[in-house]
Amino acid sequence: MNRKLILILPIVFLIFLAVLLAKGLQSDPRKLDSTRVGKPAPAVALTTLDGKQFNSQSMQGKVWLLNVFASWCSACVIEHPKLMQLAEQHRLPLVGLAYKDKTSDTVTWLKQHGGNPYDIIAVDLDGRVGIEYGVYGVPETFVIDGEGKVRMRHAGPVDDEFIAQHVEPLLLAASAGGAK
């Protein structure tokens, strides 16, 4: 009896691990829950890339995007053209958060990849602000409404679908007179 149990236990354990692995492979890492959605965005006061100060309270009343990026982020290269296109439209402020990145590396990266799409780039050298937002990795983008609430967290490169589903409705509501 003990011999059969010794043979069966590893098989049961392997089946259990296989089920967990299969479940994990089916989940979409871009849809990780965020505790910030629907709540006020954390107050941010940081030095900007050009040495000025950025305070997120100055964005009150505006729909804006906080895009967390870094020069060491390979996926940030993928989303950069979409951010450049969005910036050319001048429809909403784009705030970049240079996450755990040296200022000189950020400047070089922007030059190498077609320019600066951001209205402001706040520097988060130690990652403190990223932690406050619950950043899992880069790139991540937060849509913040005119009331200062986080409406959406998007992990991975932004694309047309993200803009259409999560940014456009807020811009339309804001232009119709609502702060949301």
Image (cartoon, grey):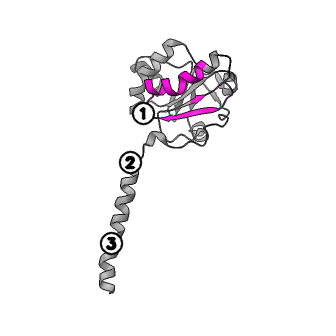
N-terminal label among 2 and 1: 2
| 90 versus 39 height, above or below | above
> What element does badge 2 sit on?
helix
Residue at which label 1 appears: 72
Residue at which label 3 appears: 10
Are the two marked residues, 2 and 1, in contact with CB atoms closer than 8 angstroms? no
Residue at horizontal 60 percent and vertical 43 percent from the top: 35
Q: Looking at the picture, how far across and down is residue 95, in whole percent?
A: 57, 24
Classify mark 3: residues with Cα within 10 Å, few (<14), some (14-19) or many (20+).
Answer: few
Q: Looking at the picture, how far across and down is residue 166, in whole percent?
A: 53, 28
Looking at the rendered image, the quarter that the C terminus falls into is: top right
The disc at residue 26 is: 2
Give the label, 1 or 3, closer to the camera. 3
Marks 1 and 3, Cα distance to the nearest angstrom?
A: 42 Å
Are the two marked residues, 2 and 3, in contact with CB atoms closer than 8 angstroms? no
Q: Is residue 17 left or right of residue 89?
A: left
| 51 versus 27 height, above or below | above
Residue at horizontal 42 percent and vertical 29 percent from the top: 76
Camera-nearest residue between 147 and 70: 147
Q: Looking at the picture, how far across and down is residue 25, in whole percent?
A: 37, 49
> Which image quarter: residue 168?
top right
Give the label, 2 or 3, closer to the camera. 2
Residue 62 appears anywhere in the view: yes
Q: Amino acid at mark 1?
A: Trp
Q: Amino acid at mark 2?
A: Gln
Camera-nearest residue between 175 and 44: 175
Q: Is residue 145 magenta?
A: yes
Q: Amino acid at mark 3?
A: Pro
> What element does badge 3 sit on?
helix
Q: Which residues are magenta?
A: 143-172
N-terminal label among 1 and 3: 3
Camera-nearest residue between 48 and 104: 48
